[in-house]
């Protein structure tokens, strides 16, 4: 792997780790979650190791955000380009305010949705101790306070900000069960805490809060109308694929992302020869009997259930060696916006 643009103070560390990429033959342990295993995870994080853990959205791959060597190891383990910054996870609002400057809107959103599936991007504070490498040299920082009990006990025990991207190899769909993490990262990280299925199944909603605007950088379970109702003004959506220049973006959202190996065709109302079908609700696709493999995200048309199943079903179809996936139309309301966002990325040219 190559790191094309390295623009942080930790360049030598990143270059060193980069040379060992592919040879991160760590002894990965997978354990269930109890007080002992979570404390063991915390101690690995504090000493610079990498620990995957469940959150209510997807599994995260944690590293000590203040330790550039640990963060460099994390980029290498995921095969993630260093220009893609990481979300810092903290236990509460007061820990968050040490890292970033919160305007009134940001505070209102934090109060309404933390702990929970919301990431706020705010200007980084003067004494923010998250390393430059984790921020990719940006003047803003992405912060999240998760609600999952395992994540919370872990953060409490580490007592430092923990960066945690989704625990998948870069470019692949996010993991919703620990087996996905093992599949992608076994031998590349120290510990996987298996806390069962991540309930929501899609990554957090990312919202940028600047001086004069609040903008969604990545849709998730918290819809734009809910965000608007909390701050009492409209929230721009900056996430369309093929963004124009006046829209802000999360650097990790620019390219084709969340991609299965198979080609994906959206809004399919018919199944072509050789295709598998990812359905939703009652089956209306013509020639559905042609489908090579068939999975239904939610036979009862429940969008929350569909969100929880999406990444797992894309991975199942990959495991089965499927080459083309036709996806039935998904209503673009509520969490359906986030499902369609991920599907568009899965279908965009690579
Ligand atoms: O639900 C989630 O958010 C999960 C769990 C583990 O917390 N994490 C996650 O992290 O999805 P990751 O790294 O896979 O996605 C984070 C996204 C990337 O697209 C990155 O570019 C963007 O957040 N990001 C991070 N810092 C940013 C910043 N300062 N400005 C804009 N985007 C930022
Ligand atoms: Mg990710």
Image: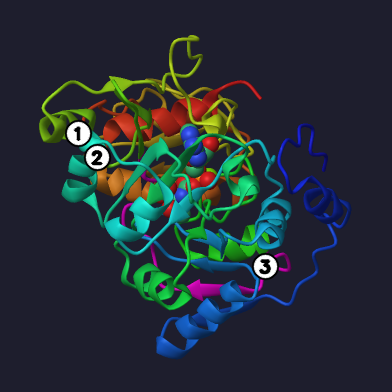
Mark toward the start of the polypeptide (1 vs 2): 2
Q: Nearer the viewer, mark 1 or mark 3?
A: 1
Asked if disc 1 and disc 2 are in contact, CB closer than 8 Å, the reply is yes
Q: Which residue is rendered at x = 32% and y = 52% of the image?
A: 200
In depth, the one of 272 and 266 nearer the eye is 266
Whether residue 11 is in magenta: the answer is no
Q: Is residue 282 left or right of residue 189?
A: left
Q: Quadrant of the N terminus?
A: top right
Majority SS type along the magenta span: loop
Asked if disc 2 and disc 3 are in contact, CB closer than 8 Å, the reply is no
Q: Nearer the viewer, mark 1 or mark 2?
A: 1
Q: Is residue 106 visible?
A: yes
Q: Which residue is rendered at x = 65% and y = 56% of the image?
A: 71
What is the spatial separation of the Cα atoms under label 1 and label 3, in whole angstroms?
36 Å
What is the spatial separation of the Cα atoms under label 1 and label 2, in whole angstroms?
7 Å
In depth, the one of 198 and 306 nearer the eye is 198
Q: Is residue 241 left or right of residue 281?
A: right
Kindly identify which residue carries mark 1: 227
Kindly identify which residue carries mark 2: 222
Residue furthest front in the image: 126
What element does badge 3 sit on?
A: loop
Q: Quadrant of the C terminus?
A: top right
Kindly identify which residue carries mark 3: 189
What element does badge 1 sit on?
A: helix
In depth, the one of 12 and 295 nearer the eye is 12
Magenta segment range?
186-205
Residue 297 is situated, as x and y percent measured from the top left of the image, at 34, 44
For the residue carrying disc 2, how many other residues have a C-alpha within 10 Å: few (<14), some (14-19), or many (20+)?
some
Residue 145 is situated, as x and y percent measured from the top left of the image, at 33, 56
Mark toward the start of the polypeptide (2 vs 3): 3
For the residue carrying disc 3, how many other residues have a C-alpha within 10 Å: few (<14), some (14-19), or many (20+)?
many
């Amino acid at each position: 792997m190559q790191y094309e643009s390295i623009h942080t103070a930790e360049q030598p560390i990143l270059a060193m780790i980069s040379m060992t990429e592919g040879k991160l033959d760590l002894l990965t342990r997978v354990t269930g979650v109890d007080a002992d295993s979570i404390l063991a995870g915390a101690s690995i994080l504090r000493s610079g190791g990498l620990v995957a853990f469940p959150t209510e959205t997807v599994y995260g791959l944690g590293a000590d955000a203040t330790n550039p060597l640990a963060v460099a190891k994390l980029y290498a383990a995921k095969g993630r380009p260093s220009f893609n910054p990481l979300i810092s996870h903290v236990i509460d609002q007061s820990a968050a305010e040490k890292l970033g400057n919160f305007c009134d809107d940001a505070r209102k959103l934090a109060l309404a949705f933390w702990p929970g599936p919301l990431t706020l991007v705010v200007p980084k504070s003067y004494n923010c101790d998250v390393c430059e490498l984790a921020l990719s040299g940006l003047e803003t920082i992405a912060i999240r306070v998760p609600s999952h009990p395992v994540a919370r006990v872990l953060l409490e025990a580490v007592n430092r900000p923990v960066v945690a991207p989704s625990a998948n190899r870069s470019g692949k769909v996010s993991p919703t069960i620990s087996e996905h993490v093992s599949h992608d990262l076994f031998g590349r990280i120290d510990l996987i805490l298996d806390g069962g299925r991540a309930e929501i199944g899609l990554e957090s909603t990312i919202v940028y809060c600047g001086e004069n605007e609040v903008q969604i950088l990545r849709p998730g379970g918290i819809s734009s109308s809910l965000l608007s109702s909390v701050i009492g003004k409209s929230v721009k959506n900056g996430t369309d694929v093929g963004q124009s220049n006046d829209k802000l973006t999360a650097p990790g959202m620019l390219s084709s992302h969340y991609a299965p190996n198979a080609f994906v065709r959206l809004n399919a109302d018919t199944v072509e020869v050789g295709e598998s079908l990812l359905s939703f609700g009652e089956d209306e696709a013509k020639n559905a009997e042609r489908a090579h493999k068939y999975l239904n995200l939610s036979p009862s048309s429940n969008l929350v259930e569909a969100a929880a199943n999406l990444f797992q079903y894309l991975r199942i179809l990959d495991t089965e060696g499927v080459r083309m996936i036709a996806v039935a139309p998904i209503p673009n309301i509520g969490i359906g916006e986030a499902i369609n966002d991920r599907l568009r990325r899965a279908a965009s040219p690579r």
